Amino acid sequence: MIRPMNKNDRGTFLIMTNAFYASDAVHEPVPQRYHAAVFDAMMSGDGFVEGYMLELHGKAVGYGMLTFAYSHEAGGMIAWVEELFVLPEYRNRGLGQEFFAYLKANVEPRVTRLRLEVMPDNVDAMRLYEKMGFSPLPYSQMAKDCTP
């Protein structure tokens, strides 16, 4: 089952997001304070970031996180699948497909495009994303960190 996160999910989310950022699925870890800050942002209801819990038999076994932005190129609002994480012992049980089916029914009607990033050596994730209809874009990602 996929459901929106709520304030009671804080501890579970913090454990899982720490595991995600300690994995090979990401380029580098983030400062610890970012984990709590993103949870607070998801709970704020500002519409820029949403979090979802992935449950199996009533137990939280993963999470997904979306961010939203306007894209001139896509002709409207887009959703970035910022993170999708399933605890290792619960992988290959269809939870990723269930998450994308949830997005198809509940998020795709609100946006013109879904985007995501994936590490080039994360072939299992890429296989899932291609199966869900994603295809590579001809862009290289570039970033500049700024301190407000």
Image (cartoon, rainbow, N blue to C red):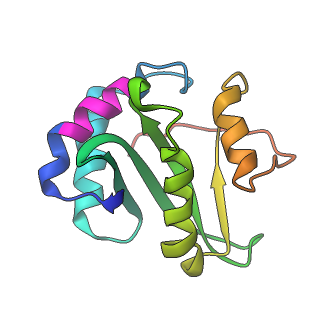
Instruction: Evaluate whether residue 119 shows in this view.
Output: no
Query: Residue 14 at x, y = what percent?
Result: 24, 35
What is the quadrant of residue 7 in the picture? bottom left
What is the quadrant of residue 73 in the picture? bottom right
Give the residues drawn in magenta, as a range: 12-19
Query: Residue 126 at x, y = what percent?
Result: 71, 36
Q: Give the left or right position of residue 21, taking residue 36 as reference.
A: right
- Front one among 122 and 89: 89
In magenta stretch: residue 40 = no
- Please tell me whether residue 54 is drawn above or below residue 17 in the rendered image: below
What is the quadrant of residue 5 in the picture? bottom left
- Please tell me whether residue 47 is drawn above or below residue 139 in the rendered image: below
Q: Give the left or right position of residue 103, taking residue 22 as reference.
A: right
Query: Residue 117 at x, y = what percent?
Result: 64, 42
- Front one among 105 and 24: 105
Measuring 17% from the left and 45% from the top, which residue is drawn there?
A: 10
Q: How many labels, in total?
A: 0
In magenta stretch: residue 17 = yes
Instruction: Evaluate whether residue 32 shows in this view.
Output: yes
Q: Give the left or right position of residue 123, taking residue 93 as reference.
A: right
Measuring 58% from the left and 80% from the top, which residue is drawn there?
A: 109
Measuring 67% from the left and 42% from the top, which residue is drawn there?
A: 128
